[in-house]
Each structure stands twice: as C-alpha cells, then as structure tokens.
Amino acid sequence: MKKIIVAGAIVLAVGLGAWYWYAYYPVTSSLTYQAEPTRPADWRYLDASLSIDERVEDLLSRMTQAEKIGQMALIEKNSISDSTDISRYGLGGLLSGAGARPDPNTPAGWQDMVKNFDTYSRRSRLGIPILYGVDANHGHGNVPGATLFPHFIGLGATHDPELVKKIASATAKEIAATGVTWSFSPTLDVATDPRWGRAYETFGSDTANVTDLGVAYMRGLQEAASPVLAAAKHYVGNGDMEWGTSINKNFKIDQGVTRIDERTLRATHLPPFKAAVQNGALSVMAGLNTWQDKKLSANSYLLTDVLKKELGFKGFVVSDWYGVYEISPSPYRSLTTAVNAGVDMVMLPFDYKSFSLYMNLAVDRGDISRERLDDAVRRILRAKFAVGLFDRRPGGDLSTLNSPDHRALAREAVAKSQVLLKNRYQTLPLSKKTKRIVVAGSSADNIGRQNGAWTIEWQGVDGNWFGGTSILGGIREAVSGDTVVEYEKSGTIVNNPQAEIGIAVVGEAPYAEGWGDAAHPELSKEDIAAIKKLRSISRRLVVVIVSGRPVDISAISGDADAIVASWLPGSEGAGVADVLFGDQPFTGRLPMAWPL
Ligand code: BGC
C-alpha cells in the first residue's frame, strides 16, 4: 500500500511538473531566432514616423502575456547564465550592479558586452530592445578611462544647473558610446543627516537646490544627442531615514525607516520628484526605505496615488535592487504586492525563471489584473521608444571617453564645487611663486579617495589604481618653476622642514551605501597627526578636506589658517589647485550645513 502511495505521489508530482513546464516554460522559446528575423513591414511599431503612443499601442497589441511579463524584469547581468534567455524570456532590461564588468574591463569591452546582450533581445519574435542600466553617479564610473566628475554633493555646492546639465550631457555621451542606455541617476534624495553613508550621492539638504540640479541632470541625460534614460531616485523620503532603523544588520540608517509625517514628506522630499515628472521623467526608482510601516516598493499610496495619479507620472517605476523581495518571505506575495502597489519593472529577480512563473500565475489567477500588466508594460515601452531604442543600435564613438573637453568640463566643475570654509590672514589664494610648499595627508596623492565610491568598484578603490590627476599633481602643475613642493603623507618632512605654506589634504576613505553610515564622521588620527606636524613647520597652513559629507574638524580647525571643503572631486584634481592658486575664484557654497 505504502509503495502504491509513494508511486502515486511521484506520478502526480511528475505530472504537475510537466504541466507546469508545458504551461509556463520556456515561456517564449518557440518565438526566438538564431539571427534577427525580418519583420513584416506592416508592424506599425517599427515605423519611426508614428507617434510614440501609436507605436506603443501597436506593439502592446501584438504581445503575449509572457512577453509582457518579460519586459517587467530587470536582471543583473551576472545572473544570465545563457544569453539566449534574453530572447526566450523577452527580458526588459539588464544592469551591471556596481563593479560588474566585462572582460576585458575597457571601454571597448563594455561596448562589446552591451551590444552582444542587445543583439539577443532583438532576436526575439518582436525584437524589443533591452535597456542596459548602470549607476553612472559621477561620470561613467564603472568604466576605466571615463571622465570622473565630482560626486553630486560637490555639484550641489556649485548651485549651477547649467553646469550640471552640461555634465550630464557629457556623461550621457560617454555612457551611450559604450552602448549603455540607462543610468540610475540622478539622486533626488534630500539628505537630512550627514551620518548617512549616501549623503554624497545627493545634491545636499536644500530641497530647492536638489530640485534645480536634479532636473538639470535628468534633462542633460535624456535630451542628449544619443539620449540616455535617467532614473530619478530614490522615491521618496530616502534622505530622511532614522538612525538605528536599518533593516540591514550591518547598517545604521541606510535601508531604514523614514519617520516623518506626510506634510514634511511633501514639503521636503516630494518637490524634486514633482519637478522631475513635470520635466519629462521616464523612470523613477522606488527607495529601499519604509514609510508608515510599508516599504516603498509596497506603498501603493505613494507609488500609485501620489506619483502616478496626483503628479501625473507617465513613465515607469523600477524597484531598487532586491527591495521587492524584502516585502514578504513569499516571493509570490512580494511580487503581487509590489506590482499592485505600482512597481512596473522589478529589479533583480536573480532567478528570472521563477519570476516568470510567479508572474504568469499571478495574472492567470487574477492576483495581478491584465489591466495592471498592460499599464506596466505600456509605461516601459513608452520610455524605450522615447529614448530611441527601436530606432538606433547601441554604441558609439569611444574616443569621447575622457576627451579633452570632458576633462576640461570636469576640472571647471571641481573648481566651482570647492567651498572656502575659513580664510584667516587672507591665506588663500596662494602665490604660485611661493618658495617652498609642504604637502601631507591621506588624500593628497590618492585618486581613489578623491573619487570616492561608485568608481570601478561599488565601494571605490583606495589608492592610485587608475587614471586622473591627484590633488598633489594639480598643485605641482600650478606652481612656478622655482617653487619646491615636497610631499610626505604623514607630514614628516625631514630635510629643511620650514615652509612658507603647508597644505594638508585629508579626508575620508571611499564607502558606499550603508557601509558608510557613521555615528560621528570625523578625520582619522593619522590625518590629524599630519595636520599637527605641518602646522609646526609651516608659516601658513591650508587644510583641504576630501569627503562625502561635513566631517568634524574641531580637532584641527584652530590650527588651520584656511579650510576648503573639496567634497569628492573626481579625476580632475587640478581643479582644486585652480582655486587654491587663484586661477579661479571660490564660488562654491555649502549644499548642507557644516558646523565648524
Ligand atoms: C542602490 C541603487 C542602485 C542599485 C543598482 C542599489 O543598491 O540602492 O541606488 O541604483 O543598487 O546598482
């Protein structure tokens, strides 16, 4: 009897499995091709002369349920074990999580990789091109050889939307050249707490400034000659999470709870998103934070009622990283909750096969309505048409990466982002004819530190492992031939120690996301010691602080004659020297409060 039950159970399980397999998997396999097929000329969505809405509706009307579901998936590229899955599942987008690179990790390597993925998407029945997304937070930072601009906190100090738009256009050019079509930027968070490890990813704490610069950046990406889709993030209130509330045991603030009332949320944090929507936002990323007991990706009030209905957002909502799957222990419930709340594209179903199963089941059962499915896909397609994916192939002229005009623009931005915090005895600007300058500090000769995180690696790289001009290099370039510049990191200058000017370039080591949450951002003991040493041997002392946020400098502020907040200037350290030596004036203003 027992044997019969076991045998029966096996037969049932195999039968169910086979039925499932037949019903749902491989979802579109019969509709993929070895090469891109020729499509009938009367498929109207292929006609570039029609309006976007006409093309979207025509395409949508041709899509199967499985093809629609595929469009809602955004997959980290390292999860794609077989590139034909891109066509088989009709995936909507791929991304390189920070640091996820091609081999070789060169601009040409990037272009080959993205083109190759793109080719597979065009081999599907309908040939809907994928979006390829990266976090280009301060230039195309994943790619060695790209121009690295100041992080947004530094751009926040410029208070200059025109400059920010130019930077976004230049960045778009470099991104598009490598074939990438989507950047998860700009960050529109209004940072209220410098202890947050992502403060530097924001334009600061002033809502109006964040709004102006954020919109300028978004437009710079989307209105470039080869447009790059922008993602306004992280919707909403992500800059106002409470210390100690993170759901990640390694973090303190990041991925935490935004414990503010709706009035404050609307007054402080919503305006940048409202302006982004008014200026043509095509994608918005939902934050990993929680508001009123609901994770943002499950918050239908904020995603659907406020963003889509009240603000009239016509683009698509993408969830952030694994956020959707943090809604509930059940992936099925997580997905249905998020999609019904208003998430249109789900980032990171690492396992896109089960995503496809769950989503098909949810639509079949009516847990997600067909109208909601169509709405989500319509929004995604609209964005794809708007940035021209159907009418061009990815990739362009790679010589635009790090071109002299982009580097000059970055250098200009660096100079405009420097903020003069203190200047007694009119120490600055310095004379280029100063006889002897001694330089010290952890960030003086460290291109990795001046770039911060989201540079080559997610957490950045400490040291001179890639190109650019260090701040020390900029100082050496700026001075006259008669000036002696001596550098020793710790400030131990042995030969003839007396100097007219000491310059200590100190600051933070790179960090990203919650790994940078810090109870008390401050200078390291080594940097403080270096400053004290320079003080004892220099007639005048300048302290340059390379940091992603205001740090406590009370231990050294009395020692310094001049103090400069340099933020995270990027690859063009010479821009710092431009203001130190008076080639450019100091025009930067604090983007967030810095108690001295
Ligand atoms: C971050 C996002 C980023 C995404 C993709 C997440 O960890 O919160 O800002 O866009 O990763 O890299």
Image (tube, helix red, strand yellow):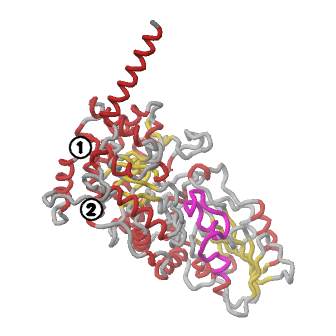
Q: Is residue 153 at all visible to an observer of this figure?
A: no
The stretch drawn in magenta includes residue 457: yes
Q: Looking at the image, which residue is at 45% across and 6% down?
A: 1
Dot 2 amino acid type: Phe
Residue 431: image location, x then y, percent: 67, 88
* Vertical order, 118 against 261 (above or below): below
Q: Quadrant of residue 179?
A: bottom left
Is label 1 in a helix, a strand or a loop? loop
Residue 495: image location, x then y, percent: 86, 82
Q: Is residue 521 at all visible to an observer of this figure?
A: yes
- The residue carrying pointer 2 sits among few (fewer than 14), some (14 to 19) or many (20 or more) residues within 10 Å by Cα, namely some
Residue 377: image location, x then y, percent: 27, 47
* Vertical order, 502 against 229 (above or below): below
Q: Which residue is mark 2?
A: 390
Q: CA distance from mark 2 to mark 1?
A: 19 Å
Q: Quadrant of the C terminus?
A: bottom right
Contact check, label 2 and label 1, Cβ < 8 Å: no
Q: Which badge, 2 or 1, comes first in the chain's sequence?
A: 1
Q: Which residues are magenta?
A: 447-475
Q: Is residue 122 left or right of residue 563?
A: left
| Residue sitting nearer the eye, 90 or 319 | 90
Give the main secondary structure, helix, strand or loop, of the magenta stretch. Answer: loop
| Residue sitting nearer the eye, 517 or 32 | 32
Dot 1 amino acid type: Thr
| Residue sitting nearer the eye, 156 or 76 | 76
Q: Which residue is mark 1?
A: 64
